[in-house]
Every structure is written in structure tokens, then in C-alpha cells.
Image: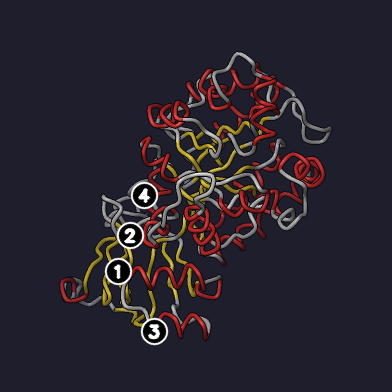
């Protein structure tokens, strides 16, 4: 069945530039495989009359925008958000690992997964790349819930066979067998995808990392996700554990874990050679500004990444991240960009912040033209935004004179109340 919506419509062209139809039409209907996709989009005057007999839902005063894409989030850390800590490593030891041990229980994992997806939807996130825990039950639970909701979603079992406490530490050989079993069960089923997921280099033995690289070569269309160069203590620890590696990032490169569809969270303390390696291999960065600010990890260097031609997109990193809200993530990214004491400061355009959390994030995941945008052929994951959802937001947006001002008002003042509706496929 075809649906037509009339509203202001935001989307992006191939050059990352926003296209905004103040009075637009979005036409959604089934493709040849029965998927709900964007059939047409554009200015109302140019499309009116092309679909006779199809009723138009009038949403004037609202904005239709692509669903947000979160490039890095931990669903098992939903209840860890807001936990105080002295930094990354104490936070993992005192909060994260004890909580993740509970995910061996499928019923518990499923209950958290349901709440997690409710939070994503409430905040307008329609696609996410997600860590589970080291327990296969945690992976099956989150995929079962995502499948039932019809989501475009990617996740994987965490690999961590050393430097981890009982309850979350896995066994090298069995962890790789479990990963392959989960790939074969879930990857490519409906809208689901699998990600090979070493937690980070310090919690995997060289043997486990090599095994992960072998699986990445065998299943070349699965994703890879991990962390790299988040804070100085972690970087020093990796240098002690892997003295022959050229760098922290080089640990992953040495075992075949740098390629397209490889997503590395944080990427703060990289050098020029690391950034060049990211560009050459096609690996991408998930920038996690609320987490980096919360844990005092540092500031992502946008200027250096752009100069190197390195690709990146935005991520919440809940529970180190402090909010599921893409508005909060985009605002934090703007703040990180402006910081100019430890790196060159710059002002990120509001439309480019939005691109990093929609079409840009989708491109980083190898899903360009699939999600994160509203061009013809894209899957119909979209939001209806209310730019007058709160009195202050309404007062501000009524005074905006350009698209950039409108988007920035939403970034600074928006929250889940501005997400009026979420359409998934």
C-alpha cells in the first residue's frame, strides 16, 4: 500500500549537502520484494498529481527526517548509564563487568533488550550497531526482539578471553565457535546483520584476535566492531601487552580486523599513520562525544580526520555515553569540535552534525542508500519531528531564518519530546 505524507522534508545529497523541501511530499510504498521504501520525494508542486487516488496525510508544521543511525552502543549497559567512576578502566571494573555478567540469563537479556529498543524508538534511532555481552544468550535475545520489531539492526557477541573477571570472560576456542554459530544463525536474516566483536585489544589474547580475523576473512560481508585509542591509560596498557605492534590500531590490522565494515569506537589518540591506515583499509570511526566527555577520555580531532580522509559518524556509546538522544550526541559533538586547546578547534555546521548521525553514519556502515536518508529506494525508516514540541523550542524555531539555524535549534533544545512519530520500514 502506498502512503503520501505532506510536511517539510529533510534529506541529503551524495555530496553530504542537505536538501530541504519546506512544503514537500514523501511517497512510501512497497518495492518488488515487498519492502516499504521511499518511492518519491520532493517539493509538493513538482510531485502533486503524480499519484492520483492516493490520500495525502497532511503534516504541515512538522518535519519529516531520516531515522537516526547510532554507530556504537552497548545494549547491556542500559542500566549502567549514569554510574560515577574515576575513568574508563575503573568504570569497567566496578560497574560494567558485574552488570554484564547477568546476561547469561536469556529472560533477563530479553527484558533489557525490550527496554533498550523502546528507548531507541523514543529517541528516533531506527538503526544501531550494538555490543551484546560475551554470552550467546545475550545475542540471541537482542536479535529476537529486533526481528520481531522489524528493525535494521547489527549486533555481536563480545570476545574477551583475558583480563576480565569471572562471569564475563569467555574461552578462546569456544568463543570463536559461538561467534560462527551466531553468524550463521542471524547474519542476513530479515533486516539483521552480525558484527564480530572483540571488546578491545587488552581483553583478547592474540589467539582470539587472530581467530576473529580469520572469521572476518571467511565472512567478508559481516561487520567488525571494537574500541581503539579511547584514553591514555588504555593506550599504554595495549603497548605493554602488544610490544611488537606498530600502534594500538596496528594490533587490529595485524590480524585482519581492519577493512570496510570495520567500526572502531572513539579513535581519539591516533597518530597520522593510524588515520592513514583507517583511510586505506576502509575502517571507520564511531565518534562518541558524550562518553568521551563523561569519562574524560579526550576530544576527537575532526580536522585531523578530515585531512587524512578518514571516515566517521556519530554514536551514543551508552552506557559510557550519557544519553540515548541523538540531539544530545550532536550537541556534544559540536562542543568537542569547538575545543581548541588540545587540537585545532572548528565549528561543525548543524546540517553536517545531522548528516553524521543519519546518512553519514549509514555510509560508514556500508548502508548508504539503504537507511539514514530519504532518497528514492531507501528503506522507509523516518521520523516526524515537531519543531514546537516545547515552549522554548517553539519560541526559538519560530525565529529561525535558515535551515542551519532551524537544525541547530533542534540540536540544542530538542529531546525525545520533539520525536512525534517513528516509522520503521
Helix, strand, or loop for circle 1? Answer: strand
- The picture quadrant where one finds residue 323 is bottom right
Question: Pointer 2: what residue?
Answer: 374
The span from disc 4 to disc 1 (Cα, nearest Å) is 16 Å
Q: Residue at x 32, y 78 (%)?
A: 401
| Disc on the earlier residue, 2 or 1 | 1
- Percent position (x, y) of residue 210? 59, 18
Question: Pointer 4: what residue?
Answer: 370
Q: Residue at x 66, y 53 (%)?
A: 294
Assess disc 4: are there few (<14), some (14-19) or many (≥20) residues with their C-alpha within 10 Å of its C-alpha: many
- Percent position (x, y) of residue 48? 18, 76
Question: Pointer 3: what residue?
Answer: 398
| Disc on the earlier residue, 4 or 3 | 4
Q: Nearer the viewer, residue 347 or 319?
A: 347
The span from disc 3 to disc 2 (Cα, nearest Å) is 25 Å
The span from disc 4 to disc 2 (Cα, nearest Å) is 9 Å
Query: Which residue is situated farthest in the top direction here?
Result: 244
Helix, strand, or loop for circle 3? Answer: loop
Q: Relative to 251, does residue 244 appear above or below in the rendering?
A: above
Helix, strand, or loop for circle 4? Answer: loop
Question: Pointer 1: what residue?
Answer: 26
Q: Can the viewer see residue 220 in this picture?
A: no
Mark 4 near mark 3, Cβ–Cβ under 8 Å?
no
Q: Nearer the viewer, residue 236 or 408?
A: 236
- The picture quadrant where one finds residue 130 is top right
Q: Is residue 367 left or right of residue 32?
A: right
Q: Give the label, 3 or 1, closer to the camera.
A: 3
Assess disc 1: are there few (<14), some (14-19) or many (≥20) residues with their C-alpha within 10 Å of its C-alpha: many
Mark 2 near mark 1, Cβ–Cβ under 8 Å?
yes
Q: Can the viewer see residue 247 in this picture?
A: yes
Amino acid at each position: 500500500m502506498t502512503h503520501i505524507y505532506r510536511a517539510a522534508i529533510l534529506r541529503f545529497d551524495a555530496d553530504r549537502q542537505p536538501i530541504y523541501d519546506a512544503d514537500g511530499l514523501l511517497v512510501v510504498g512497497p518495492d518488488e520484494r515487498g519492502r516499504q521504501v521511499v518511492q518519491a520525494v520532493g517539493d509538493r508542486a513538482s510531485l502533486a498529481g503524480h499519484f492520483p487516488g492516493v490520500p495525502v496525510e497532511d503534516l504541515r508544521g512538522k518535519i519529516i527526517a531520516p531515522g537516526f543511525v547510532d554507530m556504537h552502543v552497548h545494549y547491556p549497559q542500559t542500566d549502567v548509564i549514569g554510574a560515577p567512576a574515576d575513568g574508563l578502566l575503573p568504570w569497567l571494573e566496578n560497574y560494567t563487568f558485574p552488570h554484564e555478567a547477568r546476561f547469561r540469563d536469556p529472560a533477563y537479556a530479553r527484558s533489557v533488550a525490550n527496554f533498550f529498543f523502546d528507548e531507541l524508538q523514543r529517541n528516533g534511532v531506527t538503526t544501531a550497531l550494538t555490543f551484546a555481552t560475551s554470552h550467546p544468550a545475550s545475542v540471541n535475545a537482542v536479535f529476537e526482539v529486533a526481528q520481531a520489531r522489524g528493525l535494521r539492526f547489527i549486533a555481536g557477541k563480545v570476545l574477551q578471553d583475558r583480563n576480565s573477571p569471572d562471569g564475563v570472560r569467555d574461552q578462546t576456542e569456544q568463543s570463536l565457535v559461538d561467534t560462527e554459530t551466531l553468524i550463521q544463525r542471524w547474519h542476513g536474516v530479515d533486516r539483521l546483520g552480525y558484527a564480530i566483536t572483540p571488546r578491545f585489544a587488552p581483553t583478547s589474547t592474540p589467539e582470539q584476535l587472530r581467530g576473529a580475523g580469520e572469521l572476518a576473512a571467511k565472512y567478508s560481508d559481516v561487520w567488525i566492531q571494537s574500541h581503539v585509542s579511547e584514553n591514555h591509560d588504555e593506550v599504554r596498557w595495549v603497548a605493554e601487552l602488544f610490544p611488537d605492534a606498530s600502534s594500538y590500531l596496528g594490533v587490529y590490522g595485524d590480524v585482519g580486523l581492519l577493512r570496510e565494515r570495520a567500526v572502531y569506537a572513539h579513535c581519539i589518540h591516533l597518530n597520522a599513520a593510524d588515520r592513514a591506515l583507517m583511510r586505506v583499509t576502509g575502517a571507520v570511526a564511531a565518534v562518541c562525544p558524550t562518553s568521551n566527555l563523561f569519562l574524560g577520555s579526550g576530544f576527537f580531532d575532526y580536522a585531523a580526520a578530515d585531512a587524512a580522509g578518514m571516515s566517521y559518524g556519530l554514536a551514543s556509546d551508552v552506557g559510557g555515553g550519557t544519553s540515548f538522544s541523538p540531539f544530545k550526541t550532536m550537541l556534544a559533538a559540536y562542543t568537542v569540535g569547538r575545543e581548541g586547546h588540545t587540537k585545532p578547534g572548528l565549528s561543525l555546521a548543524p546540517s553536517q552534525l545531522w548528516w553524521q548521525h543519519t546518512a553519514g553514519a549509514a555510509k560508514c556502515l556500508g548502508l548508504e542508500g539503504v537507511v539514514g536518508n530519504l532518497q528514492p529506494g531507501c528503506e522507509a525508516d523516518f521520523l516526524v519531528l515537531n519543531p514546537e514540541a516545547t515552549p522554548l523550542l517553539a519560541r526559538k524555531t519560530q525565529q529561525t531564518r535558515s535551515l542551519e539555524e532551524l537544525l541547530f535549534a533542534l540540536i540544542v533544545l530538542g529531546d525525545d519530546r520533539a520525536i512525534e512519530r517513528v516509522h520503521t520500514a
